[in-house]
Amino acid sequence: MRTNVYVDGFNLYYGCLRHTPFKWLDLAAFCYQVLPTLAIQRIRYFTAHVRAPVNDPGKPQRQQTYLRALRTIPGLTVHLGTFLSHPAIMPLAHPVPGGPQTAEIIRTDEKGSDVNLASYLLVDGYEGDYDIAVVVSNDSDLTTPIQLVRQKLGLKVGVVNPQMSKHVSWALKNAADFYRDVHRTSLVASQFPPTLRDLHGTITKPAGW
């Protein structure tokens, strides 16, 4: 059956890729590992351009390299949200007696990816673009669009939890027709080769990845 996969890029990254040697993840191979019985026709990857922190100025370039690699996958499209930074007053976790109770921080929030994912999930389903949808995320905000696709459109929706069983959104799990966890073996088996090519030339795995 025709299957579309909707990947919450930041949930995937922070769930099972950050602080690992598996960031150079081939999403087509990953889908095959996690969903071996499904015929994947389309992968939609939702993310936002990261900004360069003071201690890691090369972070945006590494992301751009990875997005180039992803775009070599047939049937994969990248959908971009935005980052917004603003000052915020937050309470201290362990304030010193008699000292300040709050601190001013610069808060950076990623905006748009969850809304974009939900929108494409619903519109693709309405237009008959898939028989089965799979959402790669552990974000409970996606519970309602999954329920709508199943109840209003009569289509099946599965969930792949990138938190590797550490944290489970039970609302998301209960909303889905089926549910999968991500395991380390799937990440090991789903890496791009160190170099690959697109129309612009050679793409090389970032140092340290």
Image: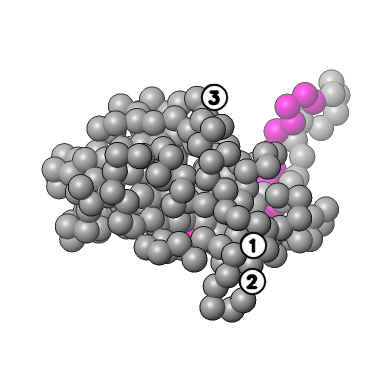
Residue sitting farthest toward the top: 97
Residue carrying label 1: 195
Nearer the observer, 96 or 54 = 54
Q: Earlier in the sequence, mark 3 or mark 1?
A: 3
Q: Amino acid at mark 3?
A: Lys
Q: Are marks 3 and 2 in contact (CB under 8 Å)?
A: no
Q: Residues within 10 Å of mark 3 (few under 14, many from 20)?
A: few
Please give the count of numbered marks on the rendered protein.
3
Q: Is residue 86 magenta?
A: yes
Q: Determine the secondary structure under disc 2.
A: strand
Residue 166, numbered circle = 3
Say above or below: 124 vs 146: below
Horizontal relation, residue 157 to residue 98: left or right: left
Quarter of the view holding residue 142: top left
Q: Amino acid at mark 1?
A: Thr
Say above or below: 30 vs 164: below
Q: Is residue 100 magenta?
A: no
Segment tinted magenta in the rendering: 80-95
Q: Determine the secondary structure under disc 3.
A: loop
Q: Earlier in the sequence, mark 3 or mark 2?
A: 3
Nearer the observer, 123 or 191 = 191
Q: Determine the secondary structure under disc 1.
A: strand
Quarter of the view holding residue 152: top left
Residue 163 position in % (x across, y down): 52, 32
Residue carrying label 2: 202
The residue shown at (74%, 31%) is 92
Residue 178 position in % (x across, y down): 29, 31
Residue 51 position in % (x across, y down): 68, 60
What is the distance, in whole Å, between disc 3 and disc 1 at their CAs?
32 Å
Q: Are marks 1 and 2 in contact (CB under 8 Å)?
A: yes
Residue 5 position in % (x across, y down): 36, 49
Camera-nearest label, 3 or 2: 2
